């Protein structure tokens, strides 16, 4: 029976090879889209699942409303983990970690390299996380000072194939003995390290890292099971204010009125896709795109299935006599149904095989767009194999069920008389097919509007006035070993080069998170006499730089003056504030306002605001511009930004390297371009925009195949009518217009149906940007014209073929 079905399917395939290829192409493109999206989604959900206890490990965070300010950061104060371990025995293990600020110079004998990912951690780090040890032991590896654990890549760089255990490296001028080597941190981790050093080192030096202080530590706990989480959270929330040294109740209660807060337990497996709070360790993905891609995959597959039904029933008139003869010879509805379902499954199998080939060809380019290393390994990827089996059966059923039912119901007497299907069955089929095409094109229109809007927003991001000039700026990475006087020497070397416009050192560059540090406006306290000095301390974003920061970054002074070497006290007492700061603190006369910088200082740095900066986008356009203070404090600066003249960039870079070597002969230079670094903030949006565009094009192609199927069906039914009209003198153009007219109505309906959901979804996506384009009528008009043009071209090609037939042949048709 199965062999017979395959033989009949093969005969049909070769007899109508053109339609068969279109069927297979549509299905295979739909399946290939689903497979690609599945691999992408699977990869995104794999983050942090390699840990043995991944489902029971949580990052602790505060969600606070305190003294009129809302705050939710990924980092916590240093006393949270000691508080948890001392008071809540249900916690299996806990640790905190701190990412060492800036690039570190690590030395071993005559070797010296820069290292970016140096992390200070508790000795319990490997009790919480399951990074694989390949040399040494995790037991006591980070307990006590002067020990270190390195990644496999670092071990190879410094020691080659030799065993590094027991070797000593120098970091920050201190010696550290290597106690273990781990496999490199997997790509699917929400944080990465190259070198781990113990927080016990800081404790041994007297640092108060376990007391309440800055939000500089990432706190993690491991619980025995998921059920423990809810009860533990209730207990911890009840004692939250203790971690801030506040008393909740009684006569000594001192929690400010209106304050509220809770601990947030974030599963580490959710961090990559669902966490986007202040102070994230690395750039995360976005669950929104998972939803968007999954919906696209379902829609494209539905379009492909609908195409099969359309194209199968479009050939029904040609197969009417075949079905009639088979019924006369004794075939019943079940036999006919099985035959056409068998054909559908054969087509689905071929489409599945072709889709795997397409994925193999497309995957390298897809990996480039998504910055991933996805591989198609069907038999080693059990979830993918299960999906393919399910999709094969579902697609085969959805694609073949309606044509099979429709064809098995043919009346053999009527069919054998005319070789056509007529009556109410034919009309209901036509209405259904029209509805399916409207559905297909509604989805396509929605995707077109989406692709255009995404492109417009990304173009807006790339061309918007940022308030600073990111072009022609080379950024040099400074290390923790570089002293302020060496920075001045380097700048003096740069001043000798005419191709270098200016240079400035800074703690951050545009595109990086600007730290929120403690400051105070004494004048505002005097205006509001209530309260004391401690209560007047606020958090404000602070950029440390030097005197040339405004010129180098192309900032604009709108009031007051710039920093200047002519004023000998600027480094000690001058501050610049942005317009957002003036507005937020209601500074009527900002220039001259007293200001104090407090963070990390025993004695505040006091001075005055000397100038107001025009607002500039130091962060991405996802965020509003917040108040910023710029001060001269070179000892905390991690970068040297160099503005160069346009021209021979290669030659200028060589001069920059020569200047660097003159000051740092034993330290290799490490640089990048500011515009590239800044644009990387939108890397996710850019790659997602490109992928959405390609999927939109695929959906349009598949929808056009469906439209082609309906056009084939209708023109086939009107073959004799066209012949009669031509005999009566109708022109080819009038015949094409007559056939195309109803399709235009279908496409207009499809556009109208798509407008509302398109507006809703896109407005929701754009709301994630503080600075965004508006969804205007032009986008919908462009999409309408484009969809109508695509439909006309698709239908006209089939209508032209019928209209140009010889009337003698058309009148003999059927």
Image (cartoon, grey):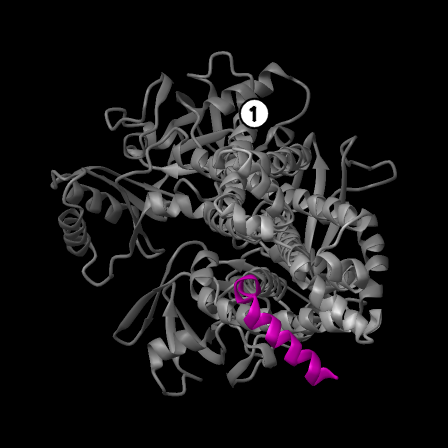
Q: Is residue 93 left or right of residue 580?
A: right
Question: Is residue 11 highlighted in magenta?
Answer: yes
Relative to 672, say whether 383 is above or below.
below
Q: Residue at point 64% right, 59% down?
A: 315
Which quadrant of the figure contains the N terminus?
bottom right
Work out which residue is located at the far bottom of the displayed protein and give it: 162
* Residue 624, x across and y down, in percent: 54, 31
Q: Quadrant of residue 503?
A: top left
Which residues fall within the magenta stretch?
A: 1-21
Q: Is residue 176 visible?
A: yes
Q: In what quadrant of the picture does the C terminus appear?
A: bottom right
Q: Is residue 406 above or below residue 182?
A: above
* Nearest to the observer: residue 782 or residue 401: 401
Residue 199 visible to the viewer: no
User: Is residue 138 magenta-colored?
Assistant: no
Residue 618, x across and y down, in percent: 44, 36
Q: Residues within 10 Å of mark 1 (few under 14, many from 20)?
A: few
* Residue beneath the point at 54% across and 41% down: 791
Q: Nearer the viewer, residue 503 or 384?
A: 384
Q: Main secondary structure of the magenta part?
A: helix
- Which residue is at a point 55% across and 32% down the rendered structure image? 784
Residue where numbered disc 1 is placed: 777
449 or 76, nearer to the observer: 449
Across and down, in percent, residue 227 comes to 85, 64
């Amino acid at each position: 029976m199965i062999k017979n079905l395959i033989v009949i399917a093969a005969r049909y395939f070769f007899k109508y090879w053109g339609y068969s290829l279109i069927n297979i192409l549509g299905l295979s493109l739909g399946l290939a889209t689903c497979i690609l999206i599945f691999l992408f989604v699977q990869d995104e959900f794999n983050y942090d699942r390699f840990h043995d206890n991944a489902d029971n490990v949580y990052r602790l965070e505060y969600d606070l409303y305190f003294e009129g300010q809302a705050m939710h950061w990924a980092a916590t104060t240093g006393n949270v983990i000691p508080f948890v371990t001392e008071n809540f025995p249900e916690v299996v293990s806990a640790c905190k970690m701190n990412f060492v600020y800036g690039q570190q110079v690590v030395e071993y004998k005559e070797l010296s390299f820069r290292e970016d990912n140096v992390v200070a951690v508790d000795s319990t780090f490997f009790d919480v996380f399951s990074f694989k040890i390949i040399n040494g032991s995790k037991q006591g590896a980070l307990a006590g000072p002067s020990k270190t654990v390195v990644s496999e890549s670092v071990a190879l760089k410094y020691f080659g194939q030799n065993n590094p255990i027991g070797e000593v490296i120098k970091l920050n001028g201190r010696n550290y003995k290597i106690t273990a080597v781990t496999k490199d941190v997997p790509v699917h981790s929400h944080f990465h390290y190259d070198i781990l050093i113990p927080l016990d080192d800081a404790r041994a030096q007297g640092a108060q890292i376990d007391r309440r202080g800055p939000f500089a530590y990432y706190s993690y706990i491991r619980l025995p099971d998921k059920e423990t989480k809810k009860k533990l959270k209730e207990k911890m929330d009840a004692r939250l204010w203790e971690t801030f040294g506040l008393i909740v109740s009684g006569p000594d209660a001192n929690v400010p009125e209106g304050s509220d807060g809770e601990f947030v337990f974030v599963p580490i497996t959710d961090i990559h896709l669902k966490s986007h709070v202040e102070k994230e360790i690395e750039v995360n993905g976005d669950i929104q795109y998972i939803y968007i891609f999954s919906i696209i995959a379902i829609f494209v597959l539905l379009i492909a299935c609908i195409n099969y039904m359309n194209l199968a029933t479009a050939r029904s008139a040609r197969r009417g006599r075949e079905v009639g003869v088979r019924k006369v010879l004794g075939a019943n509805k079940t036999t006919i149904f099985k035959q056409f379902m068998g054909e559908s499954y054969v087509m689905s199998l071929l489409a599945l095989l072709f889709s795997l080939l397409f994925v193999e060809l497309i995957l390298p380019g897809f990996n480039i767009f998504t910055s991933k290393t996805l591989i198609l390994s069907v038999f080693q990827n059990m979830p993918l194999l299960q999906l393919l089996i399910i999709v094969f059966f579902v697609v085969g059923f959805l694609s073949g069920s309606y044509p099979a039912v429709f064809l098995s119901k043919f009346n053999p007497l009527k069919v054998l008389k005319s070789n056509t299907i007529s009556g109410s069955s034919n009309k209901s089929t036509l209405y259904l097919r029209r509805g399916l095409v409207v559905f297909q094109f509604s989805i396509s229109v929605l995707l077109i509007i989406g692709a255009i809007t995404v492109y417009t927003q990304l173009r807006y991001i790339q061309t918007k006035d940022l308030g600073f000039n990111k072009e022609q700026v080379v950024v040099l990475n400074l290390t923790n070993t570089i002293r302020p006087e060496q920075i001045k020497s380097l700048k003096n070397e740069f001043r000798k080069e005419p191709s270098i416009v200016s240079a400035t050192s800074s703690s951050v560059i545009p595109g990086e998170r600007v730290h929120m540090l403690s400051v105070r406006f004494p004048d505002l306290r005097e205006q509001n006499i209530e309260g004391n000095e401690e209560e007047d301390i606020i958090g404000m974003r602070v950029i440390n730089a030097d005197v040339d920061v405004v010129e180098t970054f192309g900032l604009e002074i709108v009031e007051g003056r710039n920093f200047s070497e002519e004023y000998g006290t600027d480094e000690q007492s001058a501050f610049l504030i942005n317009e957002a700061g003036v507005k937020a603190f209601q500074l009527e006369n900002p220039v001259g306002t007293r200001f104090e910088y407090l963070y990390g200082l025993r004695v505040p740095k006091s001075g005055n605001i000397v100038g107001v900066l025009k607002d500039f986008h130091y962060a991405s356009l996802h965020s509003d511009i917040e108040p910023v203070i710029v001060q001269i404090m070179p000892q905390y600066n991690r970068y040297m930004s160099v503005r160069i003249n346009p021209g021979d960039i290669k030659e200028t870079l060589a001069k920059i390297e020569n200047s660097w070597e003159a000051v740092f002969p034993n330290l290799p230079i490490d640089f990048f371009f500011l515009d590239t670094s800044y644009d990387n903030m939108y890397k996710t949006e850019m790659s997602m925009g490109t992928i959405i565009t390609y999927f939109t094009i695929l959906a349009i192609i598949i929808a056009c195949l469906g439209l082609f199927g309906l056009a084939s069906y209708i023109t086939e039914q009107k073959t004799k009518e066209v012949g009669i009209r031509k005999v009566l003198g109708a022109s080819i153009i009038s015949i094409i217009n007559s056939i195309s007219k109803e399709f235009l109505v279908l496409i207009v309906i499809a556009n109208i149906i798509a407008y509302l959901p398109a507006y809703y979804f896109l407005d929701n996506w754009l709301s994630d940007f503080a600075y965004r384009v508006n969804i205007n009528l032009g986008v919908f008009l462009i999409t309408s014209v484009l969809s109508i043009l695509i439909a006309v071209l698709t239908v006209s090609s089939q209508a032209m073929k019928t209209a140009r037939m010889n009337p003698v042949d058309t009148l003999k048709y059927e």
